[in-house]
Image (cartoon, rainbow, N blue to C red):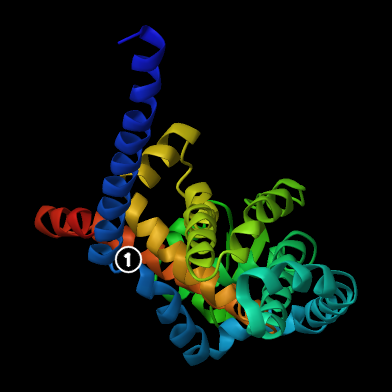
Amino acid sequence: MSESSSKGSSVPAKITETAKEEAKEFQKQTAAALRSGAYFYPFKGIAYLFSHRSLWKPLLSRLAPTMGLGLTITTFMFLFTYLPQLAVLVFTSGPVAAVTTILLVLSESSTLTMVLSKALLIEDALIDTFDGTLVARGETALVEKERQVKGGSAGDSIARLGKLVSKPFQKFTPSAVIRYFMYLPLNFIPVVGTVIFVLLQGKKFGPNAHSRYFQLKNMSKLQKEKHVEERRGAYTGFGVSGVVLEMVPIAGILFAFTNTCAAALWAADMEQAAGSSPELRDQAKKAA
């Protein structure tokens, strides 16, 4: 057998081996995500936000301009992207292409609204929601590392929040939008493509949801990477649930706040687990 034919025959074998390794890693992370229960936090965030009226204040203060932005983006997307995408989906979705395209454009509009509103309109409101949730959970000392917190006589958890020392969220950069449009063609693959799209988005979404927590903990880049890697499955599980909620048309902006509340609840649980007995810490580590 010639050297060239030997190399040629080894290529499919390497592809198969790589595919098997990726499949094993996916199964491992999926199992870790399910064991952690982190995927349920976004739903806990919904219940917690609705049951704590004081945490509504940041959301209500930004609701009108954000809804206006969402309406503008949705109108633009239907006017300029519906027909081109319909032409493509006719070949993959057949007779239901019209409905599929509407859902796709709504999802795209919701995602773009989230990206732009988080960067331009609701950054401070999300920080207040995160910090206010931590204060409500008794983690005042953690929040005080990066902002002033007034005494309990000042009022509810949001009213107690004082001046910020620094902000954790990055200002608008095109990278988030570019990444989104890079993954967007996956949605043209029925079912499977959408699942992969959500997984890829969720993998990034999870750690980003804790950017404020990492700042409050004063973690270095290396510490953050280690923290996330040790909980990769849990963060992906959280991220997938959060992404799915924020993809819901119109209601996505509301879920941005409930997801922030959820991230703070998870951070509070981490803090409480870390400050507990060695036995409980071991249990928390295994769960994460």
Mark 1 residue crowding within 10 angstroms, few (<14) / some (14–19) / many (20+): some
Q: In this rendering, would 115 be left or right of 9? A: right
Residue 193 % position (x, y)? 53, 62
Name which residue lies at 15% across and 59% down: 283
Residue 112 % position (x, y)? 74, 66
Q: Is residue 12 above or below residue 1?
A: below
**Residue annotated with mark 1:** 269
Q: Is residue 162 above or below residue 42?
A: above
Kindly indicate the quadrant of the structure image that contains residue 224. Answer: top left
Residue furthest to the left: 279
Residue 152 % position (x, y)? 50, 77
- Circle count: 1
Between residues 152 and 3, which one lies in front from this camera angle? 3
Between residues 235 and 265, which one lies in front from this camera angle? 235
The answer to whether any part of residue 134 appears in the image is no
Name the secondary structure under disc 1.
helix
Name which residue lies at 68% across and 68% down: 111
Between residues 248 and 238, which one lies in front from this camera angle? 248
Kindly indicate the quadrant of the structure image that contains residue 79. Answer: bottom right
Task: For the C terminus, give its image quadrant.
Answer: bottom left
Name which residue lies at 50% across and 51% down: 216
Name which residue lies at 73% across and 54% down: 177
Q: In this rendering, would 101 be left or right of 151? A: right
Kindly indicate the quadrant of the structure image that contains residue 86. Answer: bottom right
